[in-house]
Amino acid sequence: MSMILSASVVRVRDGLPLSASTDYDQSTGVQECRKYFKMLSKKLSQLPDRCTLKTGQYNINFISSLGVSYMMLCTENYPSVLAFCFLDELQKEFITTYNMMKTNTAVRPYCFIEFDNFIQRTKQRYNNTRSLSTKMNLADMQTEIKLRPPYQISLSELDSANGFAHLSAAEYRGTGKISAAPHQRLDPVTLPGIVSFVLSLLCGALNLIRGFHAIESLLQNEGEDFSYVIAFFLGTAACLYQCYLFVYYTGWRNAKSFLTFGLICLCNMYLYELRNLWQLFFHVTVGAFSTLQIRLRRPQGKSPDYNV
C-alpha cells in the first residue's frame, strides 16, 4: 500500500527540528529511515532545495525554502508528484503561520510542535488519494518536476565522511558533479548591519564621484596631482570590499576587514587637504562601524542545546 508514513520540519542552517508528525509505525525499516532523517538534517545547508533519497522500500523527499526544510518519509511506490505536493502544502502553511524571525531565533527542538496537527490532517488527506481535490496543483507540480527533477541522493553519498559540497545550478540539473568547496552561511542580518552596509555604499559613491571630479580637474589643469585620483578610487574599492565582506563568508575575513579599514584611514589621511574634519570623521567612523559589523556577523554554527 502506498502512503506517507512520517513528516518533519527542520531548520536548514543547523538541522534543528522545529516540528514533526506523531508516528505510530515502529517497524525496523521505518526506524532505520529515521536515522537517515537525522543524517540528512545535518547536511541540509549543503544540498539542493529539492531532493529524494531512495532507501529500498521507502523514499525520503524534502524541499527547502527560506531557511526551513520540509521532509517526509513514504513507501517506495508513493507517487513523486503527490509527495512534493504534500511538502509544498506544508511549506505554504508553515510560512503563513510562523514568521522567519521565530524560526531563526528558535533554540529548543520541536518548539513548533503544534504544527503537528496540520501535518497529520494533510497526511491523512494525501493517504486517501480519492479525496484529493488538487488536480490543478498536481498538474503544475508534475510539470515543475519534469522541468527540474529532484536531485537523487545515494546512500553512499550520505555515508561519506566528508559530506556533501554545494551543487551549482548546472550541476543540479543533470551533470551530477559536486563542487569542491562548501558555502559557509553567516548569521542573519541585523538592523545595525544593514545601516553599516548602506553607509559603506554611500561612502564608496562619494569617493567615486570625487574621483571623477579629480580626473576632470586633472585634465583641465596640468599641475594637479594624479595621486588624489588614486586615493579616491582606492577609497571606493575599500568601501565596496567592506560591503562584500559583510555579505559573504571568506577566509581570514576579520583580518581582511581590519586591513580594509586601515586602507580607508590611509586614503583619508592623504586626502586631508581636500576634505574638512567632518568629512574625514564621517568616512573613518563609517569604516570603523562596518568593520565592527563584519566582525559581529559570524558564521553560523549548531545550537549547543539540542540533539538531532
Image (cartoon, rainbow, N blue to C red):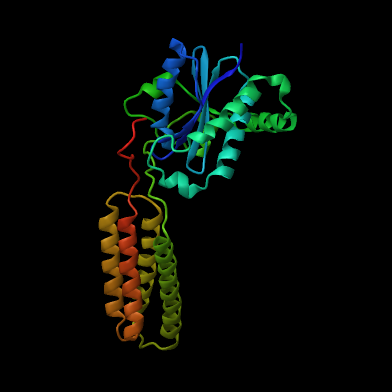
Q: Position of residue 172 (x, y in %)?
A: 51, 33
Q: Is the N terminus in the top left, top right, bottom left or bottom right quadrant?
A: top right
Residue 246 in sight:
yes
| Residue 202 shown left or right of residue 223 in the figure | right
User: In the image, is residue 40 above or below residue 55?
Assistant: below
- The residue sitting at 43% across, 21% down in the picture is 34
Q: Position of residue 19 (x, y in %)?
A: 48, 33
Q: Position of residue 99 (x, y in %)?
A: 52, 48
Q: Residue 239: which quarter of the image? A: bottom left
- The residue sitting at 43% across, 32% down in the picture is 178
User: In the image, is residue 305 above or below residue 295?
Assistant: above
Q: Residue 261: which quarter of the image? A: bottom left
Q: Is the C terminus in the top left, top right, bottom left or bottom right quadrant?
A: top left
Q: Position of residue 134 (x, y in %)?
A: 72, 30
157 and 35: which is toward the camera: 35
155 and 147: which is toward the camera: 155
Residue 49 in sight:
no
Q: Residue 5: which quarter of the image? A: top right
| Residue 56 shown left or right of residue 92 in the figure | left
State the count of labels. 0
- The residue sitting at 31% across, 63% down in the picture is 291
- The residue sitting at 52% across, 12% down in the picture is 57
